[in-house]
Image: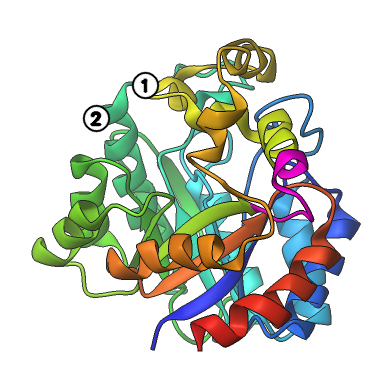
Amino acid sequence: MSEIGYFLSSEEHTPSALVDQARQAEEAGFRSVWISDHYHPWTDKQGQASFVWSVIGAIAATTGLRLTTGVTCPTVRIHPAVMAQAAATAAMMMPGRFQFGVGSGENLNEHILGDHWPPTDGRLEMLEEAVEVMRSLWEGHSVTHRGRHYHVENARIYSRPDAPVPVYVSGFGPKATRLAARIGDGYCSTAPDAGMVSLYRETGGRGPAQGGMKVCWAADEASAKKTAHTLWAHLAVPGELTQELPAPAHFEQVSALVTEDQVAEKIVCGPDPERHVEMIRAYLDAGFDEVYVNQVGGDQAGFFEFYRRELVPRLS
């Protein structure tokens, strides 16, 4: 049976607010959450970007939720040997409830140490090697690795779960989706693209497909559209810019070209439950096994009440 989870936005909310939202989500009936992993927010208007591993620890200690990082880039700003230790610790704190969602990243977050930002093929090659390194370390023996992109010298992870950490791989295009099918224990995306889910399955993907989506519930549609446009206008920008732009200021600049109506094509805005259900079902119909819904803006409590009252009966 398909599962509906909640999507925690590290770009919009403080660490403590994220932990509180996880608790509220569990009280509202959600059993699982996604949480984004950023060094920078997309825009200054969003305003937050906490160290996700600290937040995950607090969520592990205060809820019984399943959690997937949506997603972490384990290739540039943090070495995969360190990411392997972080994920192993999270999996120990959430036994059977932690999935490590990974992707090839965005320049926005990965340029901060002055490293070269590779083209797509190079990033996917790095991601594949990073997953290889992490899985070797999760076996618990001493690892020495001399690869094309990463070196590891006599490293061993002592604190690790009994079972290997499940790795879910993000894919928006055919190359990344094929990589997810080849090396992933699951697949992640933020678009209701049936073609990509089918490609994942047809090329060998056997694990769950997870989809993330955004909504902006409010008592009136106009205020919801304004909030969504203020915070997430860049979602309506086409092409590969979101992977290539290096700073929140650049996302602010490109967002100035986007209208409220364009954002409303990407984000369901307003109080009509049928429109919210229609978007969730678009992901389910595309083949996703799990759909994670993020409420844009500050009225999280209002959304959770709306979810309990209006969406659960329609989705049951």
User: Is residue 290 something one can see in this rendering?
Assistant: yes
Q: CA distance from mark 2 to mark 1?
A: 8 Å
**200 part of magenta stretch:** no
Q: Amino acid at mark 1?
A: Pro
Tell me if 261 is positioned left or right of 177 in this view: right
Callout 1 environment at 10 Å: few (<14), some (14 to 19), or many (20+)?
A: some
Query: Measured along the vertical axis of the image, is residue 277 above or below residue 199?
Result: below
Q: Picture quarter containing residue 35?
A: bottom right
Decide which of 26, 104 is in the foreground and name it.
26
Q: Which residue is mark 2?
A: 121
Query: Measured along the vertical axis of the image, is residue 235 above or below residue 271?
Result: above
Q: Which residue is mark 1?
A: 118
Q: Picture quarter containing residue 133?
A: bottom left
How far across and how far down the image is residue 31, in percent? 62, 83
How far across and how far down the image is residue 109, in percent? 60, 30
Decide which of 46, 299 is in the foreground and name it.
299
Q: Amino acid at mark 2?
A: Asp
Residue at horizontal 81%, vertical 75%? 24
Work out which residue is located at the far right of the displayed protein and give it. 16
Residue at horizontal 36%, vertical 70%? 284
Q: Quadrant of the N terminus?
A: bottom left
Tell me if 116 is positioned left or right of 270 in this view: left
Callout 2 environment at 10 Å: few (<14), some (14 to 19), or many (20+)?
A: few
How far across and how far down the image is residue 159, in percent? 63, 75
**221 part of magenta stretch:** yes
Circle 2 — which element? helix
Query: Measured along the vertical axis of the image, is residue 115 above or below residue 48?
Result: above
Q: Quick check: marks 2 and 1 in contact, CB under 8 Å?
A: yes
Circle 1 — which element? loop
Decide which of 118, 219 is in the foreground and name it.
219
Residue at horizontal 35%, vertical 34%? 149
In magenta, the rendered stretch is 216-224
